[in-house]
Image (cartoon, helix red, strand yellow):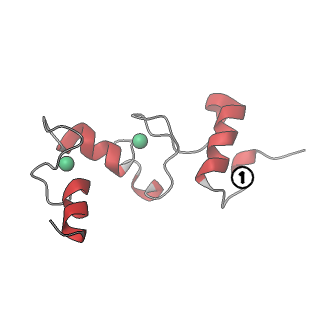
Amino acid sequence: MSGSLASQMKLTCAARIEIIEMEKQKADYLICVRCNRPVCVYEKDYLLFEKMHWICFHFEFEHGDYDPDEPCQDPSCPWNRISDAGDD
Ligand SMILES: [Zn+2]
Ligand SMILES: [Zn+2]
């Protein structure tokens, strides 16, 4: 076998996690520094979000002292999005 596994694009998150487990830190994927899982959806914004998932970035820097299970003041908080989508 030649070439690195990382050159095979279009892998699912689950597949990337398997490769990371296999190759440990040698994988080329973008790894969230907060939860150590691969960043897939917002990989283009990886640096913008301080090498984290957007949601990890939000809870790390924007969610403040609010409990992670409750909405914060930020309208883009995932909890506020959830409550907007449903009824109350
Ligand atoms: Zn993360
Ligand atoms: Zn929040």
Q: Quadrant of residue 17?
A: top right
Relative image position of residue 86 (x, y in whole percent): 23, 69
Q: Is residue 83 left or right of residue 39?
A: left
* Quarter occupied by the C terminus: bottom left
Q: Report the image quarter containing ligand 1.
A: top left
Bin the neighbour count of mark 1 within 10 Å (Cα to Cα): few under 14, some 14-19, many 20 and up. few
Q: Which residue sits furthest front?
A: 88
For label 1, the residue is 7
Seen in the picture, residue 7 relative to 60 is either above or below; the reply is below
Left or right side of 81 for 64? left
Q: Is residue 44 left or right of residue 65?
A: right
**What residue is shown at x 43% (from left), y 35% (from top)?**
35
Q: In this view, does 15 lie to the left or right of 39?
A: right
From the viewer's side, name the closer residue of 62 and 66: 66
Give the residue drawn at x 26%, y 41%.
59
Measuring from the top left, give residue 32's x and y in whole percent. 45, 40
Name the residue: 69% across, 40% down: 19
Residue 73 in picture, x, y percent from top left: 9, 51
